[in-house]
Amino acid sequence: MQLDQNPFFRKPITSWYDSNFTCWTVMILMIFVFIFAMAGIIVGSGTEEFREYVGFPTLLSFFSLFLVLKIALRLKNRSKIS
């Protein structure tokens, strides 16, 4: 009888780009990007010449916040499973 080479009790090996360290690093960098985008929104809204360009920092802040929330949920689900 042959031994089972893939038992159920083994933890799956995560890729380097999906490790906890990388996720936390990306989250911290995206928080800095969010702060930078919020500063761009404040400066763009305050100056009449830049009002038409406020859309880009708004989009940047939305995407960075979305990525932070998405990675936070991934880390939360991963810690719940372990």
Image (tube, helix red, strand yellow):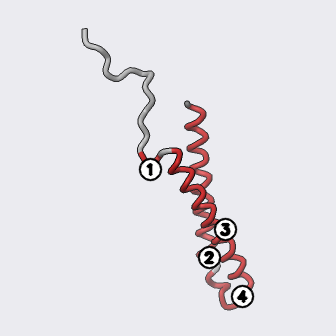
Residue drawn at 59 percent across, 36 percent down: 79
For marks 2 and 1 on the same chain, the one whose residue lies earlier in the sequence: 1
Mark 1: amino acid: Tyr
Secondary-structure class at tag 2: helix
Secondary-structure class at tag 1: helix
What separation in Å lies between label 1 and label 4 (alpha carbons)? 40 Å
What separation in Å lies between label 2 and label 1 (alpha carbons)? 30 Å
For marks 1 and 3 on the same chain, the one whose residue lies earlier in the sequence: 1
- Does 48 sit above or below residue 22? below
Labelled disc at residue 33? none
Labelled disc at residue 17? 1
Labelled disc at residue 47? 4
What separation in Å lies between label 4 and label 2 (alpha carbons)? 14 Å
Residue 49: where, in percent of width, then height? 67, 91
Outermost residue, bottom direction? Answer: 49
Which residue is more in the foreground, 42 or 14?
14
Mark 3: amino acid: Ile
